[in-house]
Image (spheres, helix red, strand yellow):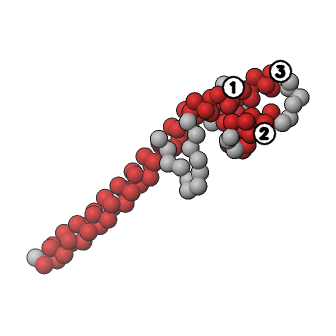
C-alpha cells in the first residue's frame, strides 16, 4: 500500500467506489446539478477534493477522460523507483571502480 503524506487520510477502496458510484448515479439523474460532489462528500464524510479526484480518476480508468489510468500510474511509480535504485547501484559501482582502479594504479607504480 502506498504511504500517505503527513496529515493525509486514507480511505478504504470500498468507500471510494461507493462514493464514485453515487456521484455517477446522481449525475445521470440530473446532469445539470453542479453540487453533486459536495453533497455526496458531505453525506459520506469525505473531503470534497478527494471525492472530485476519485471521480476524475474513475472517468480516466473508464476511458471517458484523458489521462493516466490507475494501472499506468502504478507502473510509472514502479519504474521510477526501479530507475532510482538502478542509478544508485550504478553510482556505487562507479565509485568502486574508481577506488579499485586507483589501487591497481598505485600497485603498478610501486613495481
How many numbered discs, if any? Answer: 3
* Residue 66 in sight: no
The quadrant where residue 61 appears: top right
From the viewer's perspective, is residue 52 above or below residue 26? below
Residue 68 at x, y = what percent? 63, 36
In this image, 27 relative to 98: left or right? right
From the viewer's perspective, is residue 103 above or below residue 23? below
In front of the other: 27 or 92 = 27
From the viewer's perspective, is residue 42 above or below residue 30? below
From the viewer's perspective, is residue 20 above or below residue 104? above
Name which residue lies at 57% across and 30% down: 14
Helix, strand or loop at mark 3: helix
C-alpha distance separating marks 3 and 1: 12 Å
Which residue is the extreme one toward the left? 111
C-alpha distance separating marks 3 and 2: 16 Å
Q: How crowded is mark 2: few (under 14 residues within 10 Å), some or many (20 or more)?
A: some
C-alpha distance separating marks 2 and 1: 14 Å
* Quadrant holding the C terminus: bottom left
Residue 1 at x, y = what percent? 47, 41
Write down the residue under mark 3.
Answer: 29
Label at residue 21: 1
In front of the other: 16 or 59 = 16
Assess whether mark 2 and mark 3 are in contact (beta carbons under 8 angstroms).
no
Write down the residue under mark 2.
Answer: 38
Amino acid at each position: 500500500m502506498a504511504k500517505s503524506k503527513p496529515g493525509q487520510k486514507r480511505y478504504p477502496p470500498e468507500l471510494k467506489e461507493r462514493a464514485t458510484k453515487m456521484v455517477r448515479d446522481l449525475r445521470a439523474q440530473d446532469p445539470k446539478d453542479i453540487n453533486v460532489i459536495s453533497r455526496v462528500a458531505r453525506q459520506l464524510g469525505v473531503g470534497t477534493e478527494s471525492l472530485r479526484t476519485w471521480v476524475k480518476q474513475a472517468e480516466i480508468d473508464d476511458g471517458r477522460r484523458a489521462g493516466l489510468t490507475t494501472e499506468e500510474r502504478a507502473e510509472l511509480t514502479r519504474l521510477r523507483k526501479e530507475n532510482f535504485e538502478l542509478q544508485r547501484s550504478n553510482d556505487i559501482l562507479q565509485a568502486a571502480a574508481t577506488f579499485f582502479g586507483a589501487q591497481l594504479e598505485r600497485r603498478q607504480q610501486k613495481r
